[in-house]
Amino acid sequence: MELIKLDPLSVCDTNSYIVAAESGSCVLIDAPADADYIYNEITKRHLVLKKILLTHGHFDHVGAVADLVDKTGCEVYIHEADYAKLALGDEMLGEYFRVRGCRTYGMAETVADGDIIKLDELEFDVVHTPGHTSGSVCYIIGDVMFSGDTLFCRSVGRTDLPDGDPKKLMQSLKVIWDLGGNLRILPGHMDETSLDAERVCNIYLKQAGR
């Protein structure tokens, strides 16, 4: 498995990640605006995009989805509770942040807690972590967790936007606290961290774990 962090994109400096299988097929975790940049980063490494796994449906994580599907024919996955954000634009929040022209995409596959998404030797476990949105998820592969906007380095995703729920976020953080091992945390914004470091230093995660 090869893991590549792309440059932060969109007005929100959103992280996205390429996970490549030995065959050269790859998965993209989140698809912030700038499909051309993402596509070029994939093709210059002689990789082929097969799947996009979305951590949730806000515009800054899905802005390049439709264009990347046009370029590659890849499959797209999102939790069923956030499907309307991607398919209809409902609560995608582009207009909320004065970002216009976000394309919707209405043919995604839906995922649920406990699902496993496979590509060659790669296996991603789906962990439903509502709070930032009702359909927020984390994806775990090996000792790596892509935490989207649920867990950040020393912080968590905001819950004051439409479809946010602070109580559900705390419940989701308890689920993450209880995960075994010291996972490498690759979030939707800001820097990489680790689960052990967050158990010690993240006041929100510590509160949930009590």
Image (tube, rainbow, N blue to C red):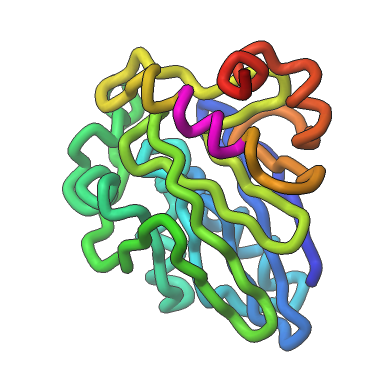
x 70%, y 42%: residue: 186
Report the span colored magenta: 170-176
Quarter of the view holding residue 164: top left
**Is 173 contained in the magenta span?**
yes
Q: Is residue 72 magenta?
A: no
Q: Residue, x 21% and y 42% (percent of image)?
A: 89
Which residue shows up at 73% across the image and 53% down it? 144
Q: What secondary structure prevails in the magenta region?
A: helix
Asked whether 207 or 102 is in front, the reply is 207
Quarter holding the C terminus is top right
In the rendered image of this protein, does residue 140 appear above or below residue 102?
below
Question: In the rendered view, does 100 fall on the left or right side of 59?
Answer: left
Q: Nearer the viewer, residue 208 or 117?
A: 208
Which residue is at 79% across, 36% downward? 194
Q: Position of residue 110 (x, y in %)?
A: 31, 63
115 or 83, which lies in front? 115
Instruction: Give residue 119's position: percent from left, percent from top.
Output: 59, 80
Side of 152 where 172 appears, left or right: left
133 up-or-down from 44: above or below = above
Q: Position of residue 132 (x, y in %)?
A: 41, 28
Q: In this picture, is 120 found above or below 144?
A: below
Q: Quadrant of the N terminus?
A: bottom right
- Total numbered labels: 0
Q: Nearer the viewer, residue 54 or 105?
A: 54
- Residue 182 falls in which quadrant of the image? top right
Relative to 210, say whether 148 is above or below: below
Residue 185 image offset from top left, x and y in percent: 72, 41
